[in-house]
Each structure stands twice: as C-alpha cells, then as structure tokens.
C-alpha cells in the first residue's frame, strides 16, 4: 500500500470509529471459552464463553452390558467471540458438528471435550452443536466419584454435584440453566421416566423410545432418567397439576404399595409448602422410588427420586425434596460453596412438615438440637464446607437450625417476606446475596448472626442476636 492510500485508510478508519461504525480494527479477536465455570470447589465443572438455551438428548441404553450410546444436540448463545469451547462429556466421542459443519474435537482429559468449529462464533450469536458418543458409564470415574447407578434390570441417572456428563454432553454447572427434550430408547418391556411431561412413546420392533420434555429451564445435574420395570400412576393433583409417580417392580408388592402411598403425599406437601413459598414453580410434579440400593434421595426437577423408605411415615423425605423445587431448582446456587441455601431450607421445611420432630414448637426443636450436638458437630463451617464435605450432616442439620434461628431473630412477617423476595425473580444466588436481602428485608444488621451460624467453627452463643433467646 502506498503512502497516500495509507493516509486515506487511516482517515476512514478514524472517521468510522468516531461515528460508531464497526470496523475490522474494532472487532474483538475470537478466543477460547474457559474449560470451567469458575467454581472454586470444582474448577472443571461447567464451561465459559456460552450459555446453553436448550438440550435435545437422544440416548439408547443397554442393560446386559451397561452400554449407552447417543447424541446430544444443544443450542447455545455465545457470550464472547469464540475460537473454540468446551463441553463436559465422560463418554467416548465419535463425531461433533457445529452449525451443521464438521468440527475438530479432542478430549483434553477424561472429563473435558474441546471443540474447535470450522469458523469462529461471534459474540451474541446462537449456534448449534451435535455430539455423538458411546461407552459404558458405570466404568467411568472422575474426581474420585463413579456416580452411575444401574444393574441389569434398572438404571437411574441421578447424582449431585455431577452426573450429566455420564449420559449427555453438557455445560454442567448450576449457573447455566436450559430447557430439555430427553428421548431414551429401551427394550420394549422397559419403561422410562424423566423430567417434565411425557410427550410421546415411539414404538419399534424390539425397542421403544420415550420422549420427555422439561419446558422450564433447569441445571444440567437436575436432568435425569430412570429406565426399568416400573409401575406408573398418572393423573392430576386437586389443583390441576399433572403428576407421574413411578415405583420399581424390583420391590415386592408390599414395598410397592408403601412407596406409592409415600409418593401420594406429594399434593398435600406441595399445598403446605405453597403457603410459605408461593406457587409451585413448575408445570408438573411426581416422583420415582427406585429398587436400586441407594442411600440418598435427589431433587431432580419436577420428579425427585427416592430410595425405598417405607410409606407415609417417611413423608418428611418428600417434604425435603419438594422444598428443593424452590430452593435448589427454581433458584440454584451460584457456586457449589453456597449449598447451605439448598440443604438448610430443605431441612427446615422437612422439620416443619414433620411437626417439629416431636418438639412443641420449631424454636424448642432448635434449642433441643443446639444443646444436643458435641463440639465436633460445630467444627464444620457450613457457609464454607469445602468440596469434600459438601453433603456432610452438619450442612443439613446445622443448616436447618440456622434457618429457624433466622426466623426467630427477624420475626415471622419479615421471614416470610424474605422467602418470597428471594424466590421471586432470580435463577441463581449466593450466600452473600441472601444475607444482603435478609438485611434489606428486615432492616437489621445480620453479619454477626450469619458469622455465628455459617462461618464459625464453634457452637453459636445462646443470645438474642443469634436467634437463640
């Protein structure tokens, strides 16, 4: 380029920038999305550079060898100009396309799938990704965990804080929610239960495909399916909410009936919770009782899963998991360190539903529990439990005690207003967000209260300030 043309080009570029007209010089160069969502506890969970809008999962599951194969088609919006991006995927990947074009891909480790599209993706644009994969999920371990649950008769894909990457390609962190279509192909004599509502059963010669749709956004770890020999009950609650109850036929007839009686407490529990928390946040409900030997329940969005635990006498467990539909599902934690917001409130409402576990009042329950546990119980700082102790007993029990103490400290009116305000218009939140809202709602300075209950390794002093007097 000669000197006169360089001067002219410089003048044109300067004029464009001053006038606000885009130019090549003003564009941001594409860069890789981060291979993690920034969670301090789990740096490799989730990914950066994009926000998933919708997942369309198509899987085929085998029971004899435990093999799963399928494809995930996801639609996302780029939050930066992307030269490449990551997905969480444990299974072996065989092909990737971005916007219909073949993309380069490689596993940077067993958990991370790195994708390089044929052309960079501009910030703010929607793009589509298709990932094909296959493998045996039960053989796969990451971060010391092997969460896949199944045998030759039944599979239940549920787990926390990780599960999604064992059966679909995901941005697996609570900070990124999306809607879902889940289609699972199984032998004809098997049934499939998943989130949301059953859209269609497509029948084949030897296999049927069950298509479920979750219309409200949810975190990837809350997506689930159960496949096996299930007895199903479908209907509507007295308020008109569609439900699906499923119970494993691995359980004997008496156990199945007890399990259905447990699940049938769902409408009454929801009515109880709605008086405190407002309208149930989703368009369907229900639950699944598995015949697998598991020692936990999980709040899969719209359809919690439960181990066999008897009949109605275990309805406290239903209250716990249904509370999570608000605290954990509707409003997810911003990072896993904020888990108290899920488990503390679920334990609190479990206690209320169970008539304070024999205490005359919730406050007497609190004082009884406060005086019962030894010093070792109080050593875990539940506002900062650490990744290895995320689901330790004090997170639940001390967490529920902290909620009742807060209620006593600020009074019922402000407590109920705080709950409604927290759940009104947010998808994610942190402990710091909640503390700020509690102070704003009550008009009180609560730093000392939350330090004592969430961030101290000592039993909170029995004072008015700590909600204990």
Image: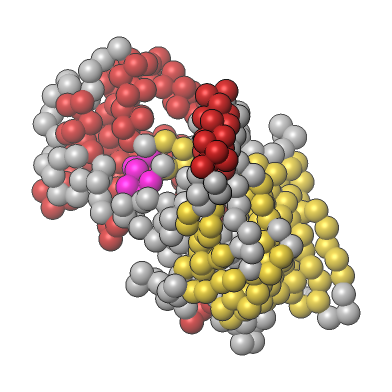
Dominant secondary structure of the residues highlighted in magenta in the image? helix
| Residue 205 versus residue 25 in the image, above or below | below
Read off the magenta span: 335-342
Name the quadrant containing residue 125.
top right
**301 or 176, nearer to the observer:** 176
Residue furthest top in the image: 443
Q: How many marks?
A: 0
Provide residue 263's location: percent of width, then percent of height: 61, 51
**456 or 124, nearer to the observer:** 124
Left or right: where does residue 47 sit relative to residue 144?
right
Provide residue 8's location: percent of width, then percent of height: 57, 34
Q: Is residue 336 magenta?
A: yes
Provide residue 262's location: percent of width, then percent of height: 58, 52
Left or right: where does residue 116 sit relative to residue 450?
right
Q: Can you see residue 284? A: no
**362 or 403, nearer to the observer:** 403
């Amino acid at each position: 380029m000669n000197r006169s043309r360089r001067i002219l080009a410089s003048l044109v570029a300067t004029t464009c920038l001053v006038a606000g007209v885009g130019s090549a010089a003003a564009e941001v160069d594409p860069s890789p999305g981060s291979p993690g969502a920034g969670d301090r506890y789990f740096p490799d969970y989730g990914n950066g550079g994009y926000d998933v809008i919708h997942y369309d999962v198509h899987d085929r599951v085998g029971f004899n060898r435990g093999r799963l194969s399928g494809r995930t088609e996801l639609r996302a919006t780029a939050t930066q100009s992307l030269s490449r991006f990551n997905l969480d995927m444990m299974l072996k990947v065989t092909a990737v396309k971005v916007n219909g074009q073949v993309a380069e891909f490689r596993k940077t480790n067993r958990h991370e799938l790195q994708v390089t599209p044929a052309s960079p993706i501009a910030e703010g644009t929607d793009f589509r990704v298709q990932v094909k994969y296959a493998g045996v999920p039960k053989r796969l371990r990451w971060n010391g965990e092997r969460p896949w649950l199944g045998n030759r008769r039944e599979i239940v894909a549920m787990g926390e804080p990780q599960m999604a990457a064992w059966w679909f390609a995901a941005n697996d962190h609570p900070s990124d929610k999306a809607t879902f279509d889940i289609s699972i192909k199984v032998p004809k004599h098997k049934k499939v239960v998943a989130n949301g509502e059953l859209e269609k059963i497509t029948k084949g010669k030897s296999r049927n495909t069950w298509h479920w749709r979750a219309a409200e956004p949810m975190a990837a770890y809350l997506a689930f399916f159960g496949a096996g020999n299930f007895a199903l009950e479908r209907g509507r609650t007295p308020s008109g909410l569609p439900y699906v109850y499923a119970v494993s036929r691995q359980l004997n007839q008496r156990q199945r009936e007890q399990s259905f009686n447990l699940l049938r407490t769902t409408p009454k529990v929801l009515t109880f919770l709605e008086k405190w928390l407002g309208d149930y946040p989703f368009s369907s409900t229900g639950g699944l009782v598995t015949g697998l030997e598991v020692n936990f329940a999980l709040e899969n969005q719209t359809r919690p899963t439960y181990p066999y635990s008897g009949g109605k006498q275990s309805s406290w467990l239903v209250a716990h998991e249904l509370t999570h539909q608000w605290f954990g599902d509707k409003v997810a934690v911003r990072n896993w360190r904020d888990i108290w917001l899920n488990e503390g409130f679920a334990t609190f409402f479990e206690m209320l539903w169970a008539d304070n576990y024999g205490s005359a009042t919730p406050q007497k329950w609190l004082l009884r529990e406060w005086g019962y546990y030894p010093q070792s119980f109080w050593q875990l700082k539940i506002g900062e439990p650490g990744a290895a102790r995320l689901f330790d007993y004090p997170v639940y029990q001390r967490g529920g005690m902290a909620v009742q103490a807060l209620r006593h400290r600020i009074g019922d009116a402000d407590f109920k207003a705080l709950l409604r305000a927290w759940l009104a218009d947010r998808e994610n939140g942190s402990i710091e967000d909640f503390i700020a809202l509690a102070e704003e709602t009550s008009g009180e300075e609560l730093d000392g209260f939350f330090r004592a209950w969430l961030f101290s390794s000592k039993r909170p002093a029995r004072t008015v300030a700590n909600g204990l007097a």
